[in-house]
Image: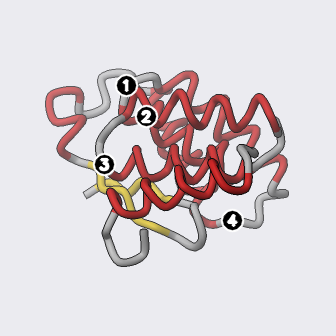
Amino acid sequence: MAAGEYDLALRAYIRAASELGIDADVLSAIGSANLKLGRLGQAEQMLTRALEMDPDFVPALNNLGVVLMERGKDGEAKRVFQRAFALDSGNSDSIRENLRLAIARTEKPDYDEDNRTNNFSLVRRGAGEYLLLSN
C-alpha cells in the first residue's frame, strides 16, 4: 500500500486471509485497498464486515467514514467519524479533520455540490489509516 501498489496489496491481504484466517484487521486492510482502487462498494462492504467482528476498530471506522463521504453519505459518515473520534479519545489529527469536514458538509448540505467528487484527496496516514483532504 505504501508503494502505491494497491492491486498487489489487495492480493497479499487476500492471501493472508486464506493463510491466517479472516479477522477485523485483514478485512479492514482489504477494504482500505479497495478504497484506494476506487472500489467504494467493495470497500464499504469489507469495512462493515470488519466492524461487525470488532465494532471498536478505529482504523476501520475512519476508513468507512471516508468511503461514506466519497459516496455522498455525509450524515452516516459524520456518525462513523464521531464514533472513531470518541474511541480514539481525540488523539488522531486525521480523524479530527475528517470529522470536521463531515460536520461542515452536513451543516451546509449544498457545500460545493457541483464539484463534490473533484475537491477531495485521500492521503495515507500510518498503517491502514487515511485522511480525506479538501483541495
Query: Is 41 displayed left or right of 77 in the figure?
Result: left
* Residue in the picture at 50% in, 31% down: 44
- The reply to whether callout 1 and callout 2 are in contact (CB within 8 Å) is yes
Query: Is 44 displayed left or right of 3 in the figure?
Result: right
* Residue in the picture at 77% in, 59% down: 90
Quarter of the image for the N terminus: give it. bottom left
Task: Residue type at mark 3: give it.
Answer: Leu
Crowding around mark 4 (Cα neighbors within 10 Å: few <14, some 14 to 19, many 20+) is few
Residue 133 image offset from top left, x and y in percent: 38, 57
Q: Earlier in the sequence, mark 1 or mark 3?
A: 3
Q: Earlier in the sequence, mark 3 or mark 4?
A: 3
Element at label 1: loop
- The reply to whether callout 1 and callout 3 are in contact (CB within 8 Å) is no
Task: Residue type at mark 1: give it.
Answer: Gly
Q: Which residue is the site of mark 1?
A: 72
Q: CA distance from mark 2 to mark 3?
A: 16 Å
* Residue in the picture at 48% in, 59% down: 131
Crowding around mark 1 (Cα neighbors within 10 Å: few <14, some 14 to 19, many 20+) is some
Crowding around mark 2 (Cα neighbors within 10 Å: few <14, some 14 to 19, many 20+) is many
Q: CA distance from mark 1 to mark 2?
A: 5 Å
Q: Which mark is residue 37?
A: 3
Residue 58 image offset from top left, x and y in percent: 73, 51
Element at label 3: loop
Q: CA distance from mark 1 to mark 3?
A: 18 Å
Q: Which residue is the site of mark 4?
A: 92
- The reply to whether callout 3 and callout 4 are in contact (CB within 8 Å) is no
Query: Is 55 displayed left or right of 12 in the figure?
Result: right
